[in-house]
Image (cartoon, rainbow, N blue to C red):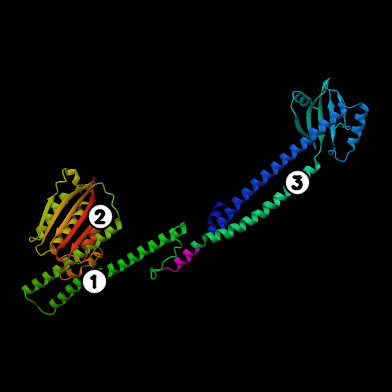
Amino acid sequence: MFLEIYRMQIRTRLALQFLLLGGMIMIIASVAIYFSSANLRKDDFNKRLWNKARSTANLLFNTSKDDANRVLGIERNSPVNLQNEKIIIINFNNDIVYSSDENKEIEIKNYVLQKVRSGYIVTYKQSQYEVVGTIFYTNYDRFVVLAAATDIEGSLRMKKLAIILIIVCLISLFLFFIAGWFYSGRALKPISDVVKKVEDISITSLNLRVFEGNGTDEIGRLAKTFNNMLERLETSFAMQKNFITNASHELRTPLTSINGQLEVLMMKDRSTTEYKSALGSVLDDIKSLVDISNRLLLIARTSAEGPMNLNKKIRIDEILWQAQEEMKRFNNDYHINISIDNSLTDSDQMIVIGDEYLLKVAVSNIIDNACKYSPDHTVDIKFHHIEKWIEVVFEDRGIGISEVDLQKIFEPFYRGTNALSISGCGIGLPLVNQIIKNHNGTVKLSSQIGKGTVVTILLPIV
């Protein structure tokens, strides 16, 4: 049953919950009203019985015998008397001195007499009769007065009240369900509108957005969050499309070159020198292909991993020294100057958590770009310690990057307009950015055309 309710639509569930909550409140209120009324009826009837018992005893003991009998006879036949009224007066010796219970329907119980003589007013129910017992004092004796009667009118009123409450509960349950159905429909309408709008959004229409309303309530924040997600998806799809287009172009260029050179070689016989020259050119293109493929694989790997959670401790200065040695081995004209700031007084301030290979790839790419785009092929690298971070600054005196290009420099395959004449594929900086982000760090880049570029990476230290 609960599983079926769970499978219902939210609107139906809300309406049923509204019905259940309202029904419980109505039932509790009705029960409280009924029992409160029942207690009031009982107290009122018992008070009338007590007054009747007192007035009867007073007539009997405080007037002459003839007057008392005459008044009691008149009162017994009075239409204002209680229905099936019975009055029994008992003296201290348990003798009945007066009784209007001719058929002896009221049972006289010893424990009731004892409790009344102790000063208590006793009330109890016997069959259809409600009985009140009280003590009555005279100058010479004390008497127990029992007054009994049936509250037919009160019982009928209680039955009518019960019927009215049941009818009111049933009508209220129906109204609660109707109100819950319309209320839930009104409350869920913004969500329904969001669902309808989302159904219209496909991969070809990611530019569409969901109406955010006032943007402050829960539905508005949900729509706003969904729009932010759509914006990220749109950007991701656009970047993916550009990435595929640019990757295809970058891979096709060396492949086309290799294909053309091999076709020319096969047209006729060549000398050994010509073959060697052509194969050397083909080998360069193949190396370019391998380099592009490796970088693409690294971008795919780092993009898929997200923020890394590694336990390996690495000295960032050792990474820089290793990268310097490897870069100078293959590029003799590169000048890589590394200096350590005075703020780094402890070797532990150089230790970071991460992947040694990826960090070396990142700094190597920054060094290669700095030297490649600088006329003097020089880069200055400085270390700084800032609270819980290690800051590594790469500064060159190269061609610089324009403000427009800085906005897109971390997009794969994007290259500055002033760098198109220099060999490259536009993968280095996006790869650096992704690697540093995965190490919970940040990359900052500032540049001026013709003056150089400063790349700053911040990594958390242990």
Asked if residue 309 shows in the view, the reply is yes
Mark 3 crowdedness (10 Å alpha carbons): few <14, some 14-19, many ≥20: few
Question: Are the residues tagged 3 and 2 within 8 Å (C-beta)?
Answer: no
Q: Which residue is mark 3?
A: 159
Kindly tell me whether residue 354 is visible in this rendering. Answer: no
Q: Give the labeled residue for mark 1.
A: 249
Comes first in the chain, label 3 or label 2: 3
Q: Amino acid at mark 1?
A: His
State the CA–CA distance, disc 1 to disc 2. 30 Å
Identify which amino acid the numbered label 3 is placed on.
Answer: Lys
Asked if disc 1 and disc 2 are in contact, CB closer than 8 Å, the reply is: no
| Residue 223 percent across, percent down from the top left | 43, 61
Q: Quadrant of the C terminus?
A: top left
Q: Is residue 135 left or right of residue 282?
A: right
For marks 1 and 2, the one nearer the N-term is: 1
Left or right relative to 45: residue 443: left
Badge 2: residue crowd in 10 Å (few <14, some 14–19, many ≥20): some
Secondary structure beneath dot 3 equals helix
User: What is the three-letter code of the residue carrying label 2?
Assistant: Thr
Q: Tag 1: Cα neighbours inside 10 Å, few (<14), some, or many (≥20)? A: some
Disc 2: which residue: 442
Q: Is residue 209 above or below residue 350?
A: below
Front tag of 1 and 3: 3
| Residue interval drawn in magenta | 192-201
Magenta highlight on residue 103 = no
User: Which x, y percent locates residue 6?
Assistant: 53, 54
